[in-house]
């Protein structure tokens, strides 16, 4: 293998392990050195992965790269624990847990990994931390998101996200939050579910410029919800079932979302025979579990909307009146610009493009939704249907300037060609 290929393979393997092992290792190391030192735990994992990149590029990738990472992380943790400021948290561990020789076991036992990550979820969602900082901490600590990826998920700036992380870590230090599952864990569950949904969406609509779908992030989101569902300490799991249903139903359409050239295919043009019926059934099953209590929630409504799409034989035969009604209920619970933008699609089909256009113009005047390319592509589609070519072109050109992912830019350019053919 030549050097360039070896370097490419080592980087790909390191990125894979970064995504799959980051949250596990940070959680376990935090267990040893205390939540007030969570940033140190992150630094240890970052250094471990940097060492992996350096070592694996210069040498052969080890036969068991996972074990290599764990051993390196353990040795770095040993070095940190020699410092006085970290010894107290280590000494405060229960008797029998003070041996770092169990480090690898903490990372290879599914049951222990689930327990550690569940505890870390609730540490990040401590009541003293604002909701925005809670979500940012989970995405950073448990999911290994970069600052820019979190900023994309929040439609925010890197500077703002960094400030939220700083504030969140400060509260962990100030309140000396214990690495345990709190008795009032249901109060923090909403923030955790919102974070997991952001993780799934980052996989479904990646911010990275060269990627179409990040399956690893979607699978990680599903895995995190299953941790919550499998926990005997969470009594009301209806929200968990609703989110799992939503993710299964959306994931069922993955294979139909791309053509042979790896370009995005919009739902209206997708081959529904490619929709994964097994995932649709899993989604429906979890939706039934979520509706047993009958209480409306954001994820329950979104999952029901997705189910309506999945059971429809065609785009035209979709029950758009029902979907609009569901969005009307969703707006009551979550009156966000993105919710109103999504609502405009069934609104245009049911009540006409002009009404949808007027609502979007008002939405842009009263929010910052105009900074997102999806707003302009949606508005352009309504103008196109009304044969207002000049306004459709204007909106699509705005969308191209705002889009950052090549996938989105290519799709917008194709739309532009349908409005103004060469």
Image (tube, rainbow, N blue to C red):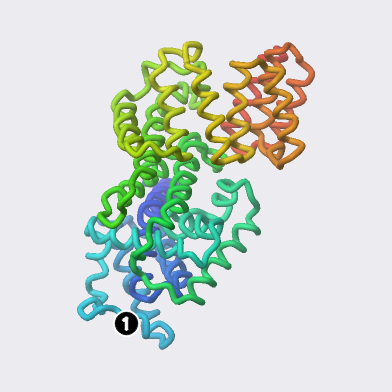
Q: Is 292 above or below relative to 83? A: above
Q: Residue furthest bottom?
A: 84
Say which quadrant the C terminus sits in. Answer: top right
The image quarter containing residue 312 is top left
Secondary element type, mark 1: loop
Q: Is 71 above or below relative to 191? A: below
- Taking the image as shown, residue 366 lies to the left or right of residue 282, namely right
Q: Nearer the viewer, residue 260 or 391?
A: 391
Which x, y percent locates residue 184?
A: 38, 62
Q: Residue furthest right?
A: 390
Q: Residue furthest left?
A: 96
Q: Which residue is at a point 42% across and 33% down the rendered structure image?
A: 303
Which x, y percent locates residue 162?
A: 60, 61
Which x, y percent locates residue 275?
A: 37, 22
Q: Which residue is at a point 66% across and 20% down the rendered structure image?
A: 381
Q: Which residue is at a point 51% across and 17% down the rendered structure image?
A: 268
> Which residue in the structure is indicated by mark 1?
92
Q: Residues within 10 Å of mark 1 (few under 14, many from 20)?
A: few
The image quarter containing residue 348 is top right
Which x, y percent locates residue 212?
A: 50, 34
């Amino acid at each position: 293998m030549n050097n360039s290929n070896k370097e490419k393979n080592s980087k790909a393997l390191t990125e894979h392990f970064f995504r799959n092992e980051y949250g596990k290792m940070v959680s376990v190391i935090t267990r040893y050195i205390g939540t007030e030192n969570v940033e140190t735990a992150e630094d240890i994992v970052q250094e471990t992965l940097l060492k992996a990149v350096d070592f694996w590029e210069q040498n052969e990738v080890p036969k068991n790269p996972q074990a290599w990472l764990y051993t390196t992380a353990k040795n770095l943790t040993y070095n940190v624990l020699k410092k006085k400021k970290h010894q107290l948290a280590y000494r405060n561990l229960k008797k029998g847990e003070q041996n770092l020789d169990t480090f690898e076991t903490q990372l290879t036992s599914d049951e222990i990994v689930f327990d550690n990550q569940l505890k870390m979820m609730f540490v990040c969602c401590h009541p003293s931390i604002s909701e925005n900082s809670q979500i940012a901490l989970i995405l950073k600590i448990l999911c290994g998101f970069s600052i820019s990826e979190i900023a994309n998920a929040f439609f925010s700036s890197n500077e703002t996200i960094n400030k939220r992380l700083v504030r969140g870590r400060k509260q962990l230090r100030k309140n000396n939050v214990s690495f345990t599952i709190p008795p009032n864990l249901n109060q923090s569950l909403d923030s955790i579910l919102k974070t997991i949904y952001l993780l799934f969406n980052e996989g479904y609509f990646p911010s990275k410029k060269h990627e179409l779908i990040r399956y690893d992030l979607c699978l990680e989101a599903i895995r995190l919800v299953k941790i919550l569902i499998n926990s005997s300490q969470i009594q009301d799991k209806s929200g968990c079932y609703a989110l799992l249903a939503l993710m299964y139903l959306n994931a069922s359409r993955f294979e139909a979302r791309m053509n042979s050239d790896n370009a995005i295919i919009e739902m209206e043009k997708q081959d529904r025979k490619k929709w994964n019926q097994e995932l649709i059934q899993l989604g429906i099953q979890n939706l039934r579990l979520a509706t047993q209590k009958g209480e409306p929630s954001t994820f329950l409504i979104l999952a029901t909307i997705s189910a309506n799409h999945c059971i429809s034989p065609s785009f035209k035969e979709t029950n758009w009146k029902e979907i609009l009604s569901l969005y009307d209920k969703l707006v009551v619970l979550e009156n966000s610009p993105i919710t109103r933008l999504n609502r405009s699609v069934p609104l245009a089909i049911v009540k006409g493009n002009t009404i949808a256009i007027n609502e979007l113009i008002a939405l842009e005047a009263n929010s910052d939704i105009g900074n997102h390319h999806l707003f302009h592509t949606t508005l352009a589609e309504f103008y196109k249907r009304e044969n207002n070519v000049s306004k459709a072109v204007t909106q699509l050109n705005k969308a191209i300037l705002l889009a950052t992912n090549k996938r989105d830019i290519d799709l917008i350019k194709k739309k532009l060609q349908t409005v103004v053919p060469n």
